[in-house]
Image (tube, rainbow, N blue to C red):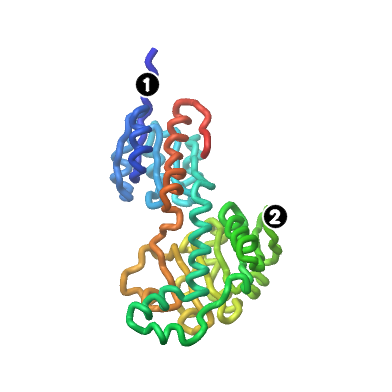
Amino acid sequence: MKRERPRILLAEPLDPATHARIAEQADVVFAPSSDEARLIAALPGVQGLVVRTHTRVTKAVIDAGSALRVIGVAGVGVERVDLAAASERGITVLSTPTAASDAVAELAVTLMLNLLRPIPQLAAAYAAGRFEDARRNPHGVELRDCTIGILGLGNIGSRVGRICAAGFGARVIYHDVADVRPIGFEAERVRADPLWRESDILTIHVPLTSETRGMIGRSVLEQMRPGARLVNTARGAIVDTTALIDALRSGRLAGAGLDVIEPEPVPPDHELFQMGSCILTPHIASRTHGGLWRMHAVADAVLAHLRSERARGV
């Protein structure tokens, strides 16, 4: 007896190879839209839904998917999925928590290095013909001479700690509400207040929750040591953008490296773009070829779930 092909809705594009592979084994509906009404309109008969980071799977979307059995999120965070509504319906939610850990960790360290050695400003000075001016004075700080403070020692935070401690010889401290320990590198666990006060670079690696939303606000930024730097490759809403701008403008913070910001995206005339002390990248920490390929494998897991097979590698 021929097995019925499952019906899977892709709400955002996947890499061509993954798309083609899934289409060989399922009826694929491609409806790229972050608009809730259009997403709901595409749901009839859909058993599996695959989204990335821009699609919000609300209770209304879940309720409209009468045949929906599984939701796959190609990424780490599932905060855009109404987990309570999914649980109430018995819908499984899959994600790829480790798929892009190396990619995100590497960008976090890249931002640190660019902040410590002001690469954008020095490159701009050279391009403007100020070669000797740029060379006249020493520029920057070595990472090995810094205390790196990690907020959240999960998959990504651990990789950042390992790179900074084992790779550069930096002192690493961390704070995590979970009882986690570093593996393969030395790091000191501290409470939150010492993390703010002692870090030369504070790097954020916690999920966005009701507890972490706005966590890095004015009171935390005022506790940070003068001349410290902030790196955020997690979620923009964890940092109070207005308070951050004030800290950079006053000079209390020497710099910020942001792959995410709230709201996102910010307009080209945003004040942060005018600050030489701030580096913004367009939410691309996970978007390496390998990172995307591994995240998109959640589509295979959705298909396997629908075919009552064990999902592997996700």
Comes first in the chain, label 1 or label 2: 1
Residue at the (41%, 49%) spot, across then down: 289
**Gap between marks 1 and 2 measured at Cα:** 47 Å
Q: Does the rendering let one see residue 277?
A: yes
Which element carries disc 1, helix, strand or loop? loop
User: Is 4 placed above or below 183 here?
Assistant: above
- Mark 1 surroundings within 10 Å by alpha-carbon count, few (fewer than 14), some (14 through 19), many (20 or more): few
Q: In which quarter of the image is residue 26?
A: top left
Label for residue 181?
A: 2
Residue at the (53%, 52%) spot, across then down: 101
Residue indicated by mark 1 = 4
Residue 102 image offset from top left, x and y in percent: 52, 53
Do the CB atoms of the residues marked 1 and 2 lie less than 8 Å apart? no
Q: Which amino acid does label 2 sit on?
A: Arg
Residue 213 image offset from top left, x and y in percent: 52, 62
Q: Which amino acid does label 1 sit on?
A: Glu
Q: Does the rendering let one see residue 58?
A: no
User: Is 196 placed above or below 233 here?
Assistant: below
